[in-house]
């Protein structure tokens, strides 16, 4: 990925993840965009956003402060996130009266776990087909995490580290 084309690269990542997730049978939310920072939790969405740019190779950051003779090597962290509506407390009264059933909670948990697995599978396919970086360029899947429910939404987020040139 070219650093001077970072925005285009982010848009390409979004398109590639939407395509790969759909191919895996995931119900991809219709709201899809490159976010300007952590996305708003205002509805179901598939988003990509820049987490930062660092010096070094993905998985091997450079911590030095001296000027190196070779060209500076950089990498970018991108987050790919799926937000979904999820079970939440509802109504008024005692908490036990407002808590969704174990069946409802379990269905939401299974969907988010499936999303997390699909994000990892999609990233592997994107990397294997050189759709985000070229042969020999860094592409590191750092982690896939579930995001706690908030305001009736919960999600799965993938962290990627990609070489920049």
Image: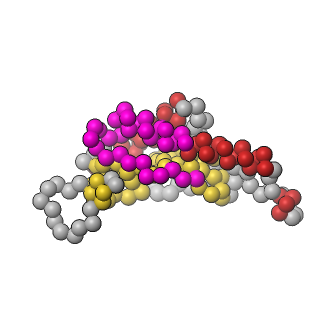
Decide which of 7, 52 is in the foreground and name it: 52
Residue 136 horizontal/vertical position (percent): 27, 41
Q: Residue drawn at (43%, 38%), measured in percent from left and top?
A: 124
> Looking at the rendering, in which quadrant would you find the N terminus?
top left
Residue 93 horizontal/vertical position (percent): 87, 64
Q: Horizontal placement of 64 versus 96: left or right?
A: left
Quick check: 102 above or below 15? below
- Residue that lies at the very extreme toward the top in this rendered image: 23
Q: Horizontal placement of 126 versus 151: left or right?
A: left
Q: Is residue 48 magenta?
A: no
Residue 102 horizontal/vertical position (percent): 78, 50
Q: Is residue 143 magenta?
A: yes
Find the magenta span and give its range: 117-146
Q: Residue drawn at (60%, 41%), measured in percent from left and top?
A: 114
Q: Residue drawn at (62%, 57%), measured in percent from left and top?
A: 148
Count of marks, rendered view: 0
Quick check: 96 above or below 31? below
């Amino acid at each position: 990925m070219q650093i001077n084309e970072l925005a285009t690269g982010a848009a390409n990542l979004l398109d590639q993840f939407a395509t790969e997730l759909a191919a895996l049978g995931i119900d991809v939310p219709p709201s899809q965009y490159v976010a300007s920072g952590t996305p708003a939790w205002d509805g179901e969405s598939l988003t990509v956003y820049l987490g930062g740019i660092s010096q070094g190779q993905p998985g091997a950051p450079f911590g030095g402060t001296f000027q190196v003779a070779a060209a500076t090597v950089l990498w970018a962290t991108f987050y790919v996130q799926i937000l979904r509506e999820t079970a939440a407390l509802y109504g008024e009264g005692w908490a036990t009266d407002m808590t969704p059933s174990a069946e409802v909670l379990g269905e939401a948990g299974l969907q988010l776990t499936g999303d997390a697995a699909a994000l990892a599978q999609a990233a592997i396919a994107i990397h294997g087909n050189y759709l985000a970086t070229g042969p020999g360029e860094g592409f590191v899947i750092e982690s896939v995490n579930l995001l706690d429910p908030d305001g009736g939404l919960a999600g799965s987020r993938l962290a990627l580290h990609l070489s920049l040139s």
